């Protein structure tokens, strides 16, 4: 049997059935009208955000990167838990506007911003994290035409990366941000043009579980921000330190020691160079805040044997859970935390693979894991499904369509 990833704390069983916030998933599925279904827990969202805030220095504000999960009820819940929001497209700008979020709390990063997106963001008063000199030229021209003062920051492509991160966002040639050596000239140009200078966005990597790696990256980020501010010749108003905090998905993964990260950052804040004395700092997190709060539920529609191997065929699949299938940047496929939700308290009886309904061998949600025996009509659960599921998976593939979503 291949090991399964660790199920996050906070789940229980009622009458042998998986329960989320004290409600059996069978009842939730009935309420939703069927599967496939994403269920997100308010209690787990709140607990995660509160624990993070308690661990971080008071000076640090927390932003939610809505790319992780833009589901409207979840976004409304996050409004009361975080200080700001980060978006990556004009579509996400429309989402935060529809949610009634103050544009002054929003920043916009991402390469390839189209003129219409820049115009909408500038008109709304969103902070733009500029990814190139060309983008800066376009933003300044649009702002002049609109007759408004744009809020502009520079996304810096640092020479370092976040060690052990799942995705490298900095270090060497990257489509993200502006190389360190070109930042000072652009910063001076933006201020000379009369822009509302908002500082730096420095994001070196994502999905890191090592506190030591995050601490070292934050040390390098603060040193780089201070040096670049000195070279620009002005104090730095704001600095987005990026994020990168991961969650345990796979066997052997351990959660980030956020207490250690927060303590180290507090020490840095107590000894900042002059250029950063009055800087407002934030971190930008997506999956860390919402990933463990979500469960993906699918129904077993068929149990079949092939050459002695058991396949539990479900009405779900990679079209909703691309990451769990191992097809979202994973080099070596490993099993996400998963379970037979309707037999959550039962012992392991067999080796089985959970597969989806798509006609591709890539559609595998769990590979040869150990499970209680399951039959048609049982529910399976894929955990850590709160981030990069519903919107980062090819829901339209083979005409299957999206899964349901609910916040409880």
Image (spheres, rainbow, N blue to C red):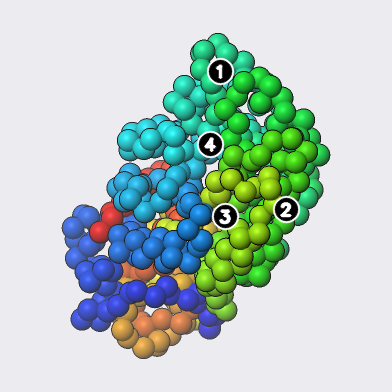
Disc 3 to disc 2: CB gap under 8 Å: no
Can you give x and y, in whole percent of width and height, for residue 26 in the image?
Answer: 22, 68
Quarter of the view holding residue 332: bottom right
Query: Which of the two discs, 2 and 4, labels the residue nearer the N terminus?
Result: 4
Q: Residues within 10 Å of mark 4 (few under 14, many from 20)?
A: many
- Name the disc covering residue 223, or none: 2
Give the mark toward the camera: 1 or 4: 1
Can you give x and y, in whole percent of width and height, for residue 139 in the image?
Answer: 60, 22
Query: Which of the two discs, 4 and 3, labels the residue nearer the N terminus?
Result: 4
- Name the disc covering residue 243, or none: 3
Q: Label 3, secondary structure: give it.
A: loop
Disc 4 to disc 3: CB gap under 8 Å: no
Q: Residues within 10 Å of mark 1 (few under 14, many from 20)?
A: some
> How many angstroms separate mark 3 from mark 1 (CA)?
29 Å
> How many angstroms separate mark 1 from mark 4 (CA)?
16 Å
Residue denoted by label 1: 143
């Amino acid at each position: 049997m291949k090991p399964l990833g660790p199920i996050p704390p906070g789940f229980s069983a009622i009458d042998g059935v998986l329960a989320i916030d004290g409600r059996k998933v069978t009842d939730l599925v009935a309420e939703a009208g069927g599967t496939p279904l994403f269920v997100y827990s308010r209690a787990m969202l709140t607990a995660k955000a509160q624990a993070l805030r308690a661990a971080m220095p008071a000076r640090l504000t927390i932003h939610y990167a809505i790319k992780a999960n833009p589901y409207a009820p979840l976004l409304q819940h996050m409004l009361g838990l975080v200080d700001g929001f980060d978006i990556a497209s004009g579509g996400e700008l429309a989402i935060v506007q529809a949610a009634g979020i103050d544009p002054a709390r929003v920043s916009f990063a991402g390469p390839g911003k189209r003129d219409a997106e820049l115009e909408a963001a500038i008109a709304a008063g969103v902070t733009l994290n500029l990814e190139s000199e060309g983008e800066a030229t376009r933003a300044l021209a649009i702002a002049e035409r609109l007759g408004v003062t744009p809020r502009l920051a520079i996304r810096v492509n640092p020479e370092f990366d976040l060690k052990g991160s799942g995705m490298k966002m900095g270090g060497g040639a990257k489509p993200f941000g502006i190389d360190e050596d070109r930042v000072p000239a652009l910063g001076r140009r933006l201020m000379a043009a009369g822009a509302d200078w908002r500082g730096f966005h420095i994001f070196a990597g994502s999905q890191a579980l090592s506190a030591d790696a995050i601490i070292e990256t934050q040390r390098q980020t603060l040193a780089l921000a201070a040096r670049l501010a000195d070279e620009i010749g002005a104090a730095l108003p704001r600095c987005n330190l990026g994020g990168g905090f991961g969650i345990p998905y796979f066997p052997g993964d351990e959660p980030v020691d956020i207490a250690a990260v927060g303590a180290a950052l507090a020490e840095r804040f107590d000894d900042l160079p002059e250029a950063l004395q009055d800087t407002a700092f934030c971190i930008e997190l997506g999956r860390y805040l919402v990933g463990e709060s979500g469960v993906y539920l699918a129904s077993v529609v068929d149990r079949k044997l092939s050459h002695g191997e058991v396949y539990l065929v479900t009405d779900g699949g990679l079209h909703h859970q691309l990451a769990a299938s191992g097809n979202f940047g994973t080099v070596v496929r490993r099993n996400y935390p998963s379970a037979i939700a309707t037999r959550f308290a039962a012992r392991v009886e067999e080796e089985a693979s959970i597969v989806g309904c798509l006609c591709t061998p890539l559609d595998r949600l769990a590979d040869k894991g150990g499970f209680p025996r399951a039959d048609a009509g049982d529910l399976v659960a894929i955990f850590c499904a709160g981030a990069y599921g519903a919107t980062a998976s090819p829901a339209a593939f083979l005409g299957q369509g999206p899964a349901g979503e609910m916040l409880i």
